[in-house]
Image (cartoon, rainbow, N blue to C red):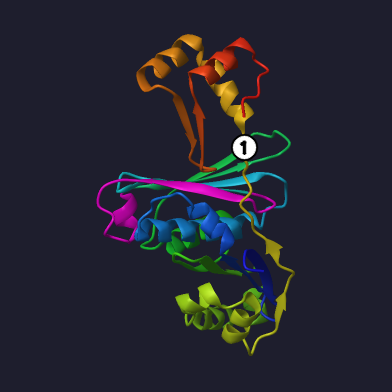
């Protein structure tokens, strides 16, 4: 599977992990965007790590990871459901030549929001953005939030995005006092081309061929967010006819862009007339 996450367990060491690779999903996330190379790479890495974390959810909720700051990248949001339906966007401006996280975000923060399907109050967690790379940022976050050492290797280019995740389980030192250090050193040899190009099983065999690796069935990652005209119509109606008419007089039409799902909705004067004359109208 080219758009999937594959969990695994190093059985003799009590170390778990995951490999994620995005190809067609990544192309869908990029479609119509004008992200530069550095921003696109950052977005791809964030998409990969969000899928990794979302795959650990044990409910039917939705995970949103949001990085914001005062640098050239003002906002990066990736949203993923428990069934691994992924979307997101980046808002940036100014100098994007520097690729390290502190230069791109400035004094930023990471917000994780977990929305529950049963309507329970969402869980939110804020932490400063700490680390020179996105992998280091999330290693720091996971170590704090889950109280377990974790390592990440992330990569993205114009064709794909990928990640390798390792986490040390509580009994690891009892199983093998040197096991975590040994596995991390082996994982450090991974190259971006391997992350982006090798199937998960082949990658794990290359890295940990002397270890007993239990590989779980892959889970598909997707990008399936159809247009929601009813939601946009309801939003426009909530603004009221007077305000909407003023916008149409000034701009000739109403244009609404859904950044997360990457859809654009257009309403001309005739559409607005129908919208307010018949609240049940379905124009598209």
Position of 167 relative to 185 (above/below): above
Closer to us: 212 or 279: 279
Magenta range: 81-106
- Indicate the quadrant containing the C terminus: top left, top right, bottom left or bottom right: top right
- Residue at image point 49% right, 82% down: 185
Regarding mark 1 in the picture, which secondary structure is present there?
Answer: loop
Residue pushed farthest bottom?
210
Residue 82 counted in the magenta span: yes
Up/down of 139 relative to 223, above or below: below
Count every numbered label the image shows and give the total. Answer: 1
Task: Indicate the position of residue 106 as horizontal and vertical percent values.
Answer: 30, 50
The answer to whether residue 215 is seen in the rendering is yes
Rate crowding at label 1 as few (under 14), some (14 to 19) or many (20 or more) other CA atoms within 10 Å.
few
Q: Is 261 positioned to the left or the right of 56 in the image?
A: left
- Measured as percent of width and height from the top left, residue 10 is found at 67, 78
Residue closer to the observer: 43 or 102: 43
From what the image shows, is residue 40 above or below residue 240?
below
Q: Quadrant of residue 201?
A: bottom right
Magenta residue check for 133:
no
Q: Position of residue 224 (x, y in %)?
A: 64, 48
Q: Residue at x 52, y 83 (%)?
A: 186
Residue 66 locus on image (x, y percent): 48, 46
User: Which image quadrant: the N terminus?
Assistant: bottom right
> Position of 216 compared to 3: left or right?
right
Task: Tell me: residue 118, above or below residue 87.
Answer: above
Res. 77 in view: no
Q: Disc 1 designates what residue?
A: 122
Q: Which residue is drawn at 58% across and 58% down?
A: 25
């Amino acid at each position: 599977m080219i758009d999937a996450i594959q969990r695994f367990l190093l059985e003799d060491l009590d170390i778990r992990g995951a490999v994620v690779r995005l190809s067609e999903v990544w192309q869908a996330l990029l479609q119509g965007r004008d992200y530069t190379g550095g921003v696109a790479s950052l977005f791809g890495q964030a998409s990969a790590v969000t899928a990794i974390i979302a795959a650990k959810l044990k409910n039917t909720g939705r995970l949103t990871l949001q990085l914001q700051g005062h640098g050239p990248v003002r906002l990066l949001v990736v949203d993923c459901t428990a069934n691994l339906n992924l979307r997101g966007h980046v808002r940036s401006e100014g100098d994007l030549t520097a690729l390290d996280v502190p230069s791109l975000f400035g004094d930023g923060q990471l917000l994780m929001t977990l929305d529950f399907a049963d309507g329970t109050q969402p869980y939110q967690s804020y932490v400063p953005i700490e680390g020179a790379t996105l992998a280091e940022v999330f290693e720091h976050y996971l170590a704090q939030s889950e109280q377990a050492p974790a390592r990440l290797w992330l990569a993205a280019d114009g064709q794909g995005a990928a990640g390798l995740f390792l986490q040390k389980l509580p009994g690891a030192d009892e199983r093998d006092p040197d096991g975590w250090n040994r596995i991390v050193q082996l994982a450090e040899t991974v190259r971006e081309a391997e992350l982006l190009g090798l199937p998960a099983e082949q990658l794990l065999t290359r890295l940990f061929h002397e270890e007993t690796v239990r590989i779980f069935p892959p889970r598909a990652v997707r990008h399936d967010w159809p247009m929601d005209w009813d939601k946009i119509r309801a939003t426009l109606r909530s603004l009221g006819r007077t305000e909407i008419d003023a916008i149409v007089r000034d701009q000739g039409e109403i244009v609404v862009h859904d950044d997360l799902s990457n859809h654009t909705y257009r309403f001309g004067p005739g559409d607005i007339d129908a919208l307010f004359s018949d609240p049940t109208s379905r124009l598209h």
